[in-house]
Image: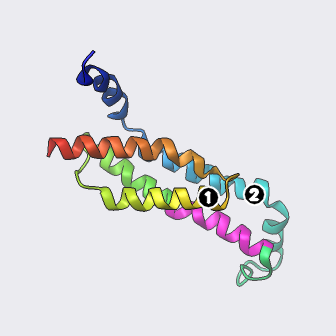
């Protein structure tokens, strides 16, 4: 079996529009889990008048950052999905891939029980899609 015969099924799976949607899903779940994991802190934020409550204490600050982290992740997913809609990914996306990879590895190292593990399939797909785009350029 040649290398091209091995690559063909992998490339067929990778070429579907899924990476941006995967990241959007991870971000949406992340933001939704704020209300599951930190219900008391969310309640305090709204009961204290909402404005200027992010620094009340460590637990509330952690809750705010947990929710806010999902927003740029949602934006990244949306931007990748926009590229995937074109059917051919733009080449030379190494910098965003490297930054997402570093963010994911750092997050996994610092907080191993986090959901950042869910970024690994999307990153692997993005690396392969970028390789395909670079080869076709």
Look at mark 2 in the image and give the residue it sits on. 35
Residue 96 - label: none
> Is residue 125 part of the magenta span, yes or no?
no
Other-residue count near label 2 (Cα within 10 Å), few / some / many at <14 / 14–19 / ≥20: some
* Relative to 90, 72 lies left or right: right
| Residue 50 visible in image | yes
N-term-proximal mark, 2 vs 1? 2
Labels 2 & 1 near each other (Cβ < 8 A): no
Q: Is residue 68 magenta?
A: yes
Which element type, helix, strand or loop, lies under badge 2?
helix
Q: Residues within 10 Å of mark 1 (few under 14, many from 20)?
A: few
Name the residue at 42% across, 39% down. Answer: 18
Q: Residue furthest left?
A: 137
**x and y, in percent, of residue 50 in the image:** 74, 77
Does residue 14 appear left or right of residue 32 in this picture? left
Helix, strand or loop: magenta stretch? helix
Residue designated by label 1? 109
Residue plotted at (79% across, 61% down):
38
Identify the element where label 1 is drawn: helix
Q: CA distance from mark 2 to mark 1?
A: 25 Å
Which residues, given as a range, are shown in magenta? 59-72
Q: Nearer the viewer, mark 2 or mark 1?
A: 1
Q: Position of residue 39 (x, y in %)?
A: 82, 60
Q: How is the image coloured?
A: rainbow
- Residue 55: which quarter of the image? bottom right
Q: How many marks?
A: 2
Of the pair 110 and 123, the residue shown nearer to us: 110
Q: Residue furthest top?
A: 1
Q: Name the quarter where the N terminus is drawn.
A: top left
Q: Who's the residue at 46% across and 56% down the image?
A: 101
Image position, residue 15 (x, y; %): 32, 34
Query: Is 76 on the left-hand or right-hand side of 50?
Result: left
């Amino acid at each position: 079996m040649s290398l091209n015969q091995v690559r063909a099924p992998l490339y067929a799976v990778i070429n579907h529009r899924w990476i941006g949607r995967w990241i959007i899903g991870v971000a949406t779940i992340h933001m939704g889990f704020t209300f599951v994991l930190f219900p008391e802190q969310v309640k305090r934020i709204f009961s204290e008048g909402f404005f200027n409550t992010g620094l009340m204490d460590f637990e509330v600050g952690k809750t705010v950052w947990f929710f806010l982290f999902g927003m740029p992740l949602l934006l990244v997913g949306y931007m990748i999905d926009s590229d995937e809609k074109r059917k051919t990914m733009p080449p030379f996306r190494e910098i965003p891939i490297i930054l997402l990879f570093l963010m994911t590895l750092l997050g996994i190292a610092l907080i191993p029980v986090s959901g950042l593990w869910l970024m690994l399939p999307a990153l692997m797909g993005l690396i392969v899609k970028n390789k395909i785009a670079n080869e076709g350029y």
